[in-house]
Image: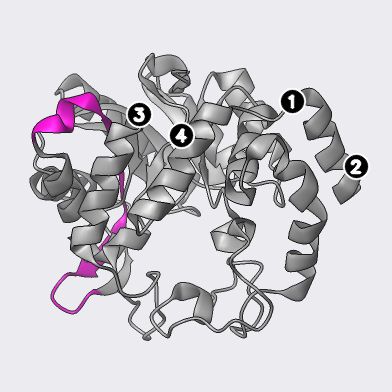
């Protein structure tokens, strides 16, 4: 079964599941040494996983220039190679970084940086256009963001990007970008443990796709995080920043979050699904606009994630059962 979604008003068709390329960027950090990646990575395995995803019908890949300070884009571009035209590539801009030290040094919301960043991303990805270009500063000033929206319209006119979006969890900010004719989506956090009704309402009203980051709650919904399991030092979850919920003070997964995952296990694993596949199926059932983008670092993860496409969304009864279990 071919299971596809449309990126909002752009008309761009994608597989209903995208692959998020944050983890394959490897290790990187901010100026204070805070880890921002998911730990060490095997580039050859990342390439094999991308190829497996392509063979299993995944046609949407989401990355960012800052993931691994350019490394994720290089790996994705190299892996796609001559198959670039088979897929829809999304990337992001707004962060400033040094690839030599793999360190970030802040953000830049100027139109000048937008164009510089796009030129660099096109080079790393080995392509002449980006399908969906996303602002990666979640709390950018709305008035300055309006200038960036207008600059994105110019880039569409030049054929350098096909559509654009804002990666933010604030519906009011997303609405600023939505005023542009070629805005196609908003990327925001959404998973069965963290609903976002206001953002989904905006997507419905403004005809935008809902591109879902953290669809597996940073790994909690894979069932692979038992209480007290430690994380490697280069993993952002080992020293979680304030916005990263579910991983307490770095002692591993938060027991309260794990208890909610356990409570949902039976309903999410119905119909022969794994827990991961059930969590993705919830997102598709939640709204016809959702495109979850789970991360991956191995062929096995690529196969499990892509396997969710065959099973499709949860039923209305299963969706209602989730709400009952969570008492929402």
Per the image, the residue denoted by label 2 is: 324
Q: Is residue 98 magenta?
A: yes
Per the image, the residue denoted by label 1 is: 315
Instruction: State how far apart marks 2 and 4 are (Cα).
Output: 26 Å
Instruction: State how far apart marks 4 and 3 are (Cα).
Output: 9 Å
The C terminus lies in which quarter of the figure? top right
Instruction: Tell me the crowding category of disc 3: few under 14, some 14 to 19, or many 20 or more residues within 10 angstroms, Cα based.
Output: many
Considering every residue shown, the one lying at the far front of the view is 272
Q: Is residue 22 left or right of residue 89?
A: right
Q: Nearer the viewer, mark 4 or mark 1?
A: 1
Q: Horizontal and vertical percent for residue 183?
A: 41, 26
- Up-down relation of residue 157 to residue 239 (above or below): above
43 or 211: nearer the viewer: 43
The answer to whether one can see residue 239 in this image is no
Mark 4 or 1 closer to N-term? 4
Quadrant of the rendered structure where residue 256 is?
A: bottom right
Q: Horizontal and vertical percent for residue 99?
A: 16, 70
Q: Nearer the viewer, mark 2 or mark 3?
A: 3
Instruction: Tell me the crowding category of disc 1: few under 14, some 14 to 19, or many 20 or more residues within 10 angstroms, Cα based.
Output: few
Q: Is residue 246 left or right of residue 6?
A: right
Q: Residue at x 55, y 61 (%)?
A: 219
Q: Horizontal and vertical percent for residue 145?
A: 41, 42
Per the image, the residue denoted by label 4 is: 17
The magenta region covers 82-102
Q: Nearer the viewer, mark 2 or mark 1?
A: 1
């Amino acid at each position: 079964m071919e299971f596809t979604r449309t990126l909002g008003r752009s008309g761009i068709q994608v597989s209903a599941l995208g692959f998020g390329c944050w983890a394959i960027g490897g290790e990187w950090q901010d100026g204070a040494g805070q880890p921002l990646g998911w730990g060490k990575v095997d580039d050859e395995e990342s390439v094999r996983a991308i190829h497996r995803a392509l063979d299993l019908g995944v046609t949407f890949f989401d990355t960012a220039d800052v993931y691994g300070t350019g490394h994720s884009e290089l790996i994705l571009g190299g892996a796609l190679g001559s198959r670039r035209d088979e897929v829809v590539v999304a990337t992001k801009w707004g962060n400033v970084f040094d690839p030599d030290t793999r360190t970030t040094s802040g953000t830049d919301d100027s139109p000048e940086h937008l164009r510089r960043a796009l030129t660099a991303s096109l080079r790393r990805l080995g392509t002449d256009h980006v399908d969906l270009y996303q602002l990666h500063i979640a709390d950018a000033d709305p008035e300055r963001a309006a200038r960036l929206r207008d600059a994105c319209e110019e880039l569409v006119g030049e054929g350098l990007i096909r559509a654009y979006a804002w990666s933010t969890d604030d519906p009011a900010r997303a609405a600023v970008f939505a005023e542009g004719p070629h805005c196609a989506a908003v990327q925001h956090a959404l998973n069965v443990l963290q609903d976002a009704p206001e953002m989904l309402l905006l997507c419905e009203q403004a005809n935008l796709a809902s591109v879902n980051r953290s669809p597996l709650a940073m790994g909690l919904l894979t069932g692979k995080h038992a209480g007290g399991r430690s994380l490697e030092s280069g993993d952002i979850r080992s020293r979680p920043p304030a916005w990263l919920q579910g991983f307490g003070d770095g002692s591993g997964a938060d027991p309260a979050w794990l208890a909610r995952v356990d409570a949902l296990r039976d309903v999410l694993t119905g119909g022969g699904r794994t827990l991961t596949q059930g969590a993705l199926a919830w997102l598709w059932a939640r709204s016809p606009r959702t495109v979850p983008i789970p991360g991956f670092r191995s062929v096995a993860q690529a196969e499990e994630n892509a396997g969710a496409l065959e099973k499709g969304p949860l039923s209305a009864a299963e969706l209602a059962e989730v709400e009952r279990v969570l008492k929402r």
